[in-house]
Image: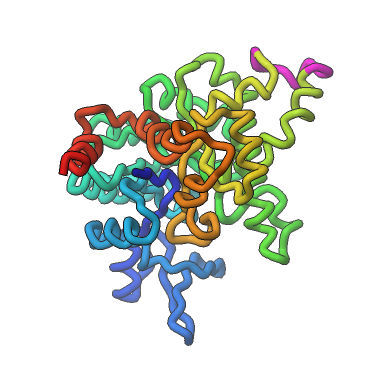
Amino acid sequence: MAIDMHAHWTPRGLIQASAAGRDWYGWRILKDQKGREHIAQGERILQFAASSAALDNPAKRARLRKEGESIDLEMLLLTAVWWNYHLDEAEAARFCREVNVEVAEVQRAYPERFQGVALLPMQHPKLALHEMEYAAGHLGLRTVFVASNVRGLNLDEPAVLPVLEAAAALGVSIVVHPTIWDKAADQRLPRYHFWNSFGAPLESSIAAMSIVYSGLLDRHPGARFMFTQGGGWIHFGVGRLNLRYLQREDARPMAQPPVDYLARMYFDCLVHDYDSLELMKKRAGADHIFIGTDYPAGGNIVGGAVPWIEKCKFLSEDEKQKILWRNAAGFLQLGPDSAFMKARRTEVTQ
């Protein structure tokens, strides 16, 4: 049994608008001469098979995913280019409500296979709070999805942090994913795919430590934050953060050294080598690692994240089961009466 905590989807509005030759909140799907799909916003173009991530046939997607890597449940994250943090209040409200209603419909129709995650208009804090309350209270979406930065602002900025504080107070789980564009050091990473291989983990690192240094985890010790790409470079580099915590008053706004907070956050397993995974297990604990596949993008473990974990020699069988699904079930608040758990019990009895 396995739960994928890092899988992406494409909104039907984009697909329908592109088929009709129209933009969707400034976006459009394009095809090149070889039939490959690209997504475009103005002059920005990114090759991405958007249609393959659509939720128009959830049953088919579930079958394909299960056949490919034994995935039983997906946490659905909107593909992390459509944050649309540039939109004004009216457009942002309409956009977020549209995608949240769609993913909630899929969760409601297939609760044993999909868990939806709400997108918030983080550039408008009051609006974000309203949408979070609506998503959690009316749509049944108890997890929210935020970018690693909001229009260049780190997550500890006064214009951003109150929304995350409110999520923690509501008991809503929070997933943080790097932006595709406008990452730290983007101008320094023009070649070799460094914008992704260096840039994405760097964004995850800054986002995770911004939360730590904000003191949010001291004020809300039960807060559930997940960071993709294994949290980036922080497990290897936390010693230098600890050094400055000891040396400088301005580097210790939180109650404990940075290393102590690694075991209070959650991370996907997308670190791509066993040495890094073993260090992450040592720092954060096997209780705080999830399966992630980056489906249908190209960030998965070669050969698949599930078999990679299953073959790992330094994990006990109990630790493997935690990473494969038990940790995720807790993060998503899937109790014994949830559709997912009931479906698994039925499969076992059959």
Depth order, front residue of 96/67: 67
- Where is residue 343 shown, x and y percent of the image? 20, 41
Say if 157 sits above or below 112 in the image: above
The answer to whether residue 12 is visible is: no
**Identity of the residue furthest to the bottom in this view:** 33
Image check: 202 left or right of 23? right
**Identity of the residue furthest to the right in this view:** 247
Which portion, as a residue range, is magenta?
246-255
Colour approach in the figure:
rainbow
Say if 288 sits above or below 61 in the image: above
Identify which residue is drawn at 23% across, 40% down. 344
Identify which residue is drawn at 27% across, 59% down. 63
Say if 84 sits above or below 44 in the image: above
The image quarter containing residue 59 is bottom left
Q: Indicate the quadrant containing the C terminus: top left, top right, bottom left or bottom right.
A: top left
The answer to whether residue 257 is visible is: yes
- Where is residue 126 shown, x and y percent of the image? 41, 31
Depth order, front residue of 209/131: 209
Q: Is residue 162 magenta?
A: no
Identify which residue is drawn at 23% across, 43% down. 112
Depth order, front residue of 71/168: 71
Identify which residue is drawn at 43% across, 33% down. 322
Q: Indicate the quadrant containing the N terminus: top left, top right, bottom left or bottom right.
A: top left
Q: Is residue 252 magenta?
A: yes
Image check: 231 left or right of 140? right
- Where is residue 248 shown, x and y percent of the image? 81, 18
